[in-house]
Amino acid sequence: MNNTEVLENEVVELIIKRCKLTDVNADEINYDAPIFLSEDDENIVEGGLELDSVDALEIVAAVKGAYGVSIDPKAMGVLHSINTLTDYIRHSMAA
C-alpha cells in the first residue's frame, strides 16, 4: 500500500468515525463519488456518502485535528470526494 492509499484509508476512517456513520462499510465507498448530496442531485452516485452541511463542519474539524490542515471556506470544493480531500491534505502537508 502506498502513501496515497494509506492517507485515503485514514481519511475514510476519520469521516466514518467523526460523522458516526455506523452503517457505512469503508470498502464500499467510491473515492471519486461526491461526499455530499446536493438538493438538485437527481442521481445518487453508487458509493457516495450522501452527507450534509453539518457533516462538512465535522470533516473540516477532524482534518484540522488529525493533520493540522485548515480548509479555507473559499476552497470547500476540496470536499467534493475522498480523492479531492486527500489530494488537498497531501499538498497542504507538503507545503
Image (cartoon, rainbow, N blue to C red):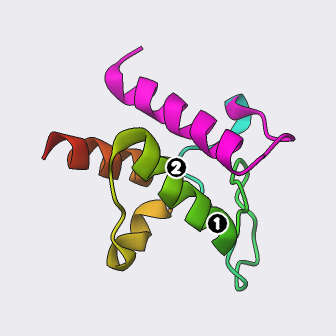
Q: Is residue 54 above or below residue 10?
A: below
Which residue is identified by label 2? 62
Q: Quadrant of the N terminus?
A: top left
Query: Mainly helix, strand or loop, the magenta region?
Result: helix
Q: Residue at x 40, y 62 (%)?
A: 78
Q: Amino acid at mark 1?
A: Phe
Q: Residues within 10 Å of mark 2 (few under 14, many from 20)?
A: many
Residue extending furthest toward the front: 65
Q: Position of residue 62 (x, y in %)?
A: 52, 49
Residue extending furthest toward the bottom: 40
Q: Which mark is residue 1?
A: none
Along the horizontal axis of the image, is 51 left or right of 57?
right
**The residue tagged with tag 1: helix, strand or loop?**
loop
| Region in magenta | 1-26
Q: Quadrant of residue 48?
A: bottom right
Q: Amino acid at mark 2?
A: Ala
Q: Residue at x 40, y 44 (%)?
A: 86
Along the horizontal axis of the image, is 90 left or right of 27?
left
Q: Position of residue 35 (x, y in %)?
A: 61, 59
Q: Position of residue 49 (x, y in %)?
A: 71, 54
Tell me the mark number nearer the camera, choosing from 1 and 2.
Answer: 2
Q: Is residue 70 visible?
A: yes
Q: Residue at x 48, y 62 (%)?
A: 79
Which residue is identified by label 1? 36
Q: Observer-nearest residue: 45 or 78?
A: 78
